[in-house]
Every structure is written in structure tokens, then in C-alpha cells.
Amino acid sequence: MSRLVHVGQVIVDIVMYVPHLPERGGDVLASSGGTEVGGGFNVLAAAVRQGLTAAYGGMHGTGPLGDLARKRLAQEQIDVLQPKVSTMDTGFTVALVDAEGERTFATTFGAEGRLRANDLARIRLFPDDIVYVSGYGLALPVNGPAVSSWLSTVESGVMVVVDPGPLAAEIPEAVLKPVLDRADWISCNEREAGLLTGEDDPLKAAEALRRRNAIVRVGAGGCVLATADEVITVPGFPVEVVDTNGAGDAHTGAFMAALAAGLPPAKAARRANAAAAIAVTRRGPASAPTIEEVHKLLSDEEPGDVAD
């Protein structure tokens, strides 16, 4: 049975809804707020909700934030592969959401930013596993070199999916190049594809990435799928957008789950588009739908095409 192993960072989001950002040195009263487990958790949860077994291979701390992260992972039935770091807690992000829905972030990393070679050596991989690598981790001074080096030891039967993320331009070339060379799939949005290739057009960017197989998300337009055989646009689904936060994670998690289930890439991409379409109709980052919800949307749009 296939399993997703995520070697990124699960972190806690402290979210506050404000009328506007405070001026420098100022203050602002939030209308509401709360804590959510985010970062790598969102992709893991998205994959699990599509029927894929998942495990978190990153680090987690000792303290209230680490406890919260582990609780949410357990609630989604996601295995934890590493022991707690005894000397520090899990890190957190402060997210200020203004009246227009724009999010402004400040992040401090904790235990999840201390993933070292000896930690990665604890992870036992199996031939049907899928390893997911996030660019956020590759940009960290400890995690990046460790993950990049470790991937060279991952056997060819294990699928590696890389999402370079918005920090792709800040990842050292010595870290990023070996990761991209090992990748079986690159999953990114059109801006990130442009950072990797220098191409503004998502079709051209996907074409440039096709040697490694690529899926480039283009928002409401769906995605561009590039393999050795073809470069095609897979259309999205018309929905009323409430919150795009977490849509990319829902897309990537569903795509990996569909590939693990044996679907061909084009059908996996269509399923991922459906998952992302449902996710944007909900608030919050961990908004990925269940497999039943995706099946319903697909059956409504394409009767008879769900079981493939």
C-alpha cells in the first residue's frame, strides 16, 4: 500500500482578523482570532482525506504548540515518524488577515527547523512510498542541505514530489539542483514555475519542466500537466471563491493520492482540480475535501467518470 511521507514542517498558525494592518509602532484590535495547525499539515491532511496513508517525517517540539500539532496529526490519522525534540517547542506563524482577505505573515521556526541527516536516517521507506518535499524546508539552513543530501539515497522506486513554493529563488542552487534532479514530479503554481524556468507563460514553463514531469496550477483555469508524452491544460471547475488559502495544498494532496491509487496523470490532475475547487469555497488553510466530496463534484460534472 502506498504511503505519503512528508519531510517538511508542521507548524502552528496564530491567525487574527483585523480591519487593517497596524502602522509601524502602532497597534490594532482584531475582530477575532484563533490557532490552527498548518504548514506541512495541510498537504498531509489533503492526501489522507483522499484515501492515502500518510506520515510526518519532520521534527516537532516539546510544549503546547508541539502538543497541538501532534493532536491534529493524530486526528487525521497521520503517523509521526520522529521523536519529540526535548529542548524546544514547535514554531509558529502569526497571520494578520485584513478586511480584503489579504494575509500578512511573520514566522519563527522551532523544532521543525532542526531536521538533520541523522533524523532523516530514521525514516524507513518502502518501494510504493511517495516522498513530498517542500521548498520552505529547502530554504532553511539546517533542513535544506540535509534533505537534499538524503534524497540522493532514496531508491528509484520511491516517487519524489517536489513543491518549490514561493521561496524557490532563495533556495541555494547547491541544495535545489539535486532535489529537482531527483524529482519524479514538480508541483507548483504558475508564479513558482516562472521562478524555476524564467518563463511567464505557464504552458512554456511546464514545457521547460517536462523532463521531470510537472503539474502547474493556474487558479480557476485548472492546471497544466507536462509529461514526456504531452503538455495539456486540464480545466478547472467553476465555483464561488471564498478563500484561496490552502487550495494549492488540497490540489497537491489530491494529485498524489490519485497517482498512488493508479490513476493516469491526466485523470489525477482532474481530480486534483476538483479538490482545489471545493477547498476554495471554504475558509481556512486545511480546507481540503473528502474523497466522497470530490467524487460527487466529478459525477455532477462528468457522469460515469469517477471510478477510473
Image (spheres, rainbow, N blue to C red):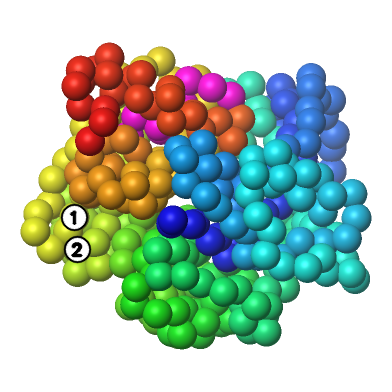
Residue type marked 2: Arg
- Which is more toward the observer, 98 or 178? 178
Residue 43 position, x and y percent, is 52, 47
Q: For this view, does 122 lie left or right of residue 62?
A: left
**Can you say whether 89 is above or below 138 in the image?**
above
| Mark 1, secondary structure of its residue | strand
Q: CA distance from mark 1 to mark 2?
A: 5 Å
Magenta segment? 273-283
Q: For residue 81, which numbered disc appears in the image?
A: none
- Which is more toward the observer, 188 or 293? 293
Query: Which residue was labeled with disc 2?
Result: 210
Q: Residue at x 40, y 64 (%)?
A: 128
Q: Are marks 1 and 2 in contact (CB under 8 Å)?
A: yes
Q: For residue 226, which numbered disc appears in the image?
A: 1
- Which is more toward the observer, 105 or 140? 140
- Mark 1: give few (<14), some (14-19) or many (20+) Cα within 10 Å: many
- Which is more toward the observer, 252 or 34? 252
Residue 159 position, x and y percent, is 37, 66
Magenta segment's dominant SS is helix
Q: Which residue is farthest front? A: 1
Q: For this view, does 277 lie left or right of residue 23?
A: left
Please identify the quadrant where the N terminus is shown: bottom left
Query: Residue 259: within the magenta?
Result: no
Residue 195 position, x and y percent, is 35, 61
Give the number of marks.
Answer: 2
Q: Residue at x 72, y 67 (%)?
A: 82
Q: For this view, does 116 lie left or right of residue 185?
A: right
**Can you say whether 196 is above or below 202 in the image?**
below
**Can you say whether 122 is above or below 23 in the image?**
below
